[in-house]
Amino acid sequence: MFSVQDFKSVADKYKVIFFDAFGVIKSYNGLIPGMDKTFAYLEEQGKEYYIVTNDASRSPQQLAQTYHKIGLDVIQQERIISSGMLAKEYLDLKVNDGIVAYLGTESSAHYIDSSGLHTLPVSAITQYNIDQVNALVLLDDEGFNWFDDLNRTVNILRKRTIPAIVANTDHIYPISGSNDVSIAIGGVATMIESIVGKKFIRFGKPDSQMFMFAYDLLRERSSAPISKKDILMVGDTLHTDILGGNKFGLDTVLVLSGNTLPDDAETRIRATGIVPTYVCESAGV
Amino acid sequence: MFSVQDFKSVADKYKVIFFDAFGVIKSYNGLIPGMDKTFAYLEEQGKEYYIVTNDASRSPQQLAQTYHKIGLDVIQQERIISSGMLAKEYLDLKVNDGIVAYLGTESSAHYIDSSGLHTLPVSAITQYNIDQVNALVLLDDEGFNWFDDLNRTVNILRKRTIPAIVANTDHIYPISGSNDVSIAIGGVATMIESIVGKKFIRFGKPDSQMFMFAYDLLRERSSAPISKKDILMVGDTLHTDILGGNKFGLDTVLVLSGNTLPDDAETRIRATGIVPTYVCESAGV
Amino acid sequence: MFSVQDFKSVADKYKVIFFDAFGVIKSYNGLIPGMDKTFAYLEEQGKEYYIVTNDASRSPQQLAQTYHKIGLDVIQQERIISSGMLAKEYLDLKVNDGIVAYLGTESSAHYIDSSGLHTLPVSAITQYNIDQVNALVLLDDEGFNWFDDLNRTVNILRKRTIPAIVANTDHIYPISGSNDVSIAIGGVATMIESIVGKKFIRFGKPDSQMFMFAYDLLRERSSAPISKKDILMVGDTLHTDILGGNKFGLDTVLVLSGNTLPDDAETRIRATGIVPTYVCESAGV
Amino acid sequence: MFSVQDFKSVADKYKVIFFDAFGVIKSYNGLIPGMDKTFAYLEEQGKEYYIVTNDASRSPQQLAQTYHKIGLDVIQQERIISSGMLAKEYLDLKVNDGIVAYLGTESSAHYIDSSGLHTLPVSAITQYNIDQVNALVLLDDEGFNWFDDLNRTVNILRKRTIPAIVANTDHIYPISGSNDVSIAIGGVATMIESIVGKKFIRFGKPDSQMFMFAYDLLRERSSAPISKKDILMVGDTLHTDILGGNKFGLDTVLVLSGNTLPDDAETRIRATGIVPTYVCESAGV
């Protein structure tokens, strides 16, 4: 049903390309083959590009370094839009004082920390400071004791009427060197939300706020007017990249180099009703 | 816990006000008392205001007329952002040819029609034209036979791998002159979505795309730079107006003139964890 | 992975067989080929059998007649366990007086009526008799005006704190002579339940109460002791027949003559984790 | 709306009483006041009674000892029906060989172990024995490392098409000496189920299998015939005890000595539509 097309000829039709990161640009084996040439081609053609990624474990600066390590020096931090940036913007705009309790590594908290709020791991919340907790942020699945701190999180949210922010909506992520996966903080968040019966605030694809953030930056920095018709979203996951891109009004490419396997693509498109504009084997050229 | 504040003194702190429509500006008894003075005051103070409403049953022009009829001539169609406008933008950007099948009144379809697509009610889809159906839009709960056309909708979506767009996320709406409610098209959409097992595209608060649409218009039309800090969202419903406003980074007012009753407000804020910046009895001054 | 086995050799290992009806014994084309011989064989071997079916549209007596019409005279009403029987038992045990409002045909109501309660269609509930409504039963998707009566149902359940009983948990059912389906009352029930936010009482597979009802009858009528190990459940649907049979502790056969197509069986077993003890092409011999 | 009644006069109308355990018979402060007299009264009147409890952390024998320790010697293990017993029956009937992997304490596994299967904690499952794992049971929230073993559980269930059994459906449980709660294994199970996308088999109230197990035992042991009309279910939780009792066809008492506080009872009954036959302050007399 869906003919597989050549990425370069698809990309040629657009002025701006948004890329998902994992499964599109890189995998646990490093760079997806041909992606260095893809970015060289985009630079040569004067096309804009952004990385739009569900990731709140590191700052954009640190994320940029992970690309430099695998040889993609071209990707600067200004080109990276992460769900962590949205969580940070939320805190900057909406939480003015007090403690922000978090689940995640110290490094993930360091990034949101800079807004002047006092961030503390959930493990450091006690009866003496709980009344000063004005927000709780779920950043990363590592850096804390699950049994102790997930139970603590439930009890903090039962006692305090405060926003709970989920900085990455993914439920699982792949693990290096195997077919195994790890439970992501977005999966943990769903459990906690259902247990406390409150409504959490989630940042990350497919939510349109991610795309809007990138679109806003793009328009700010661009001299020429840019419309949604000029932008192509490239991703490997139907439920985040393609659904979100479609809903925002962008044309979308499903690449088969990550989460969606070539043999399953058509079945999954039919089953979910999430239809990419194009299907390409990979974004590498 | 939440002290009830005077709306005028809250509004004074902001340059721009976003209003929900039903339960905030008007009810089935007409204008909410004092709202005429509120808009006169905003005009006098040179503040911007927008109506941000989950409504796809009519065009912004028709919606504006409903305000004129109850004496609010000040509300022009340029100030109205409806979920129907997002559905229309989606079709304009993403569906280029073929038939758009719809559930709703002819008048609701007329509005999305203008983009040049061929709109047809679900009842007019047969074995002869089903292959040309490239999108299905759920606009309004009236204008069709529920038994026949909801069953038809299920079967169209089983046969065609096409986007299904929900142009109003509300599940119920109040009915004139009683405490009764009616099932809204958003409630119907959830049933159809669960039966066909596909992912629908939903437009309407609390989704941030509604707020972004208003924010974009505002920035286009405004000479001075506007930040999210300058905008106040006013609504009567925690799960749509307040959650959506908060998530977009706006300060929010819960008014007690509509869906949320004065006696329940605190209980519901605590139960849902959706916390408005302020609570006011009404937006009327 | 799952080898397809011969039904007769599987059945030979058990004393009692429970059959699902649609997709196992009959389809819209009449009897599933070989099912007459299957029942003749069971009779000959002195094995017990029961039909365990999600159906509240008719009485067991009327259901039995549908088998006689297609030539299966052997199936007597005593051998039929329907979800409607459980709804009727519930009303007999738990609702002592007043009105039972219902959605469905008059014929479906006639069956539950016999318990002495006053049954009335939802369309006959007004402000004058609503206070006497002590239960609401969802029986069938036909026999009422969907728009009017589903809205009435929502409002009755908002006003009255009464049990809502769903007498058939299926969400869709196949329609004669095509690949089309119809929305079943169980699908409608899920929408109403989510809109009113109350907990409905559902009868039907996979719930174990269906199997328990059959098991109880079996033990009452049988002279020899019967254990769950002696019973085989035969069905065409993983989520109802197989999940329910497994959970109740029975061995199960998935037949490929109905809902689950031969090409999909393995994929669906893997995807759902619902594993039948055996897979057979059909229960016909 | 619901008048609070005297427990003794309610109990007098029934031959058999089913009790929930926690919040009804005992709390973290020990025996609920008056419960010793309640059981003395039931003994004196020759009434039957059973404890029907969502608990898979210990054997019925160990559970009985917890009552003896607080002075209720009258409660023998034969009177205890736990969700763990259903999980054990399932394994006895449906899993014939291989490894049963479990999440929980060694003591919880010891109980299901006796059926002759080889039980191993999830932490002991490796690439060398994973192919022999034929079932996975979630027993208790303690006894394992949450981060390591919940991730292991997800990966086992991705690789093996086997039943996953949840032996306790509760999502939280209260913690000694505070208003804090702990996440129960049923809450953890919901997260894992949603992440792997498979259907788990759950044992525990409100599922009718719990009540059926008790009802079956009762009929086996009783000389006189017993009908559902003769049985009263006593519980402190609407969603498990009362919903399950009602659905099974039993009359029900909501007691206000545990999960449901006197001030909330009426609001919660109205909000959920789960209506007990009676409301009593406590089952203590």
Image (cartoon, coloured by chain):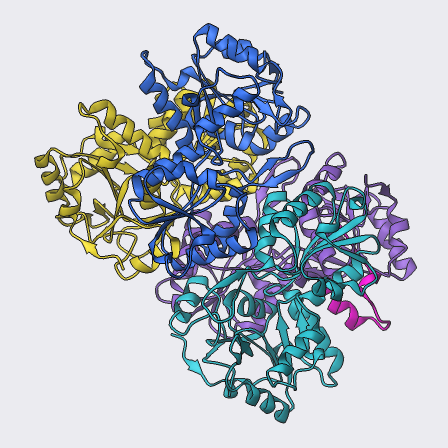
Chain colours: A yellow, B blue, C cyan, D purple
Tell which of B161 and D116 is nearer to you.
Answer: B161
Q: Position of residue A243 (x, y in %)?
A: 35, 45
Q: Position of residue C254 (x, y in %)?
A: 49, 74
Q: In this picture, is B75 found above or below D153?
A: above
Identify the image quadrant of the N terminus of chain C: bottom left
Tell which of D216 and C220 is nearer to you.
Answer: C220
Q: Position of residue D200 (x, y in %)?
A: 52, 59
Q: Residue furthest top?
A: B44
Q: Is residue C150 visible?
A: yes
Which residue shows up at 56% across the image and 13% down it?
Answer: B36
The image quadrant that residue C104 belongs to is bottom right
Question: Does the magenta run of residues contain C245?
Answer: no
Q: Residue furthest left?
A: A44
Q: Position of residue C175 (x, y in %)?
A: 52, 67
What residue span does the magenta drawing correspond to?
D214-235
| Left/right of residue A178 with respect to residue C116 in the rendered view | left
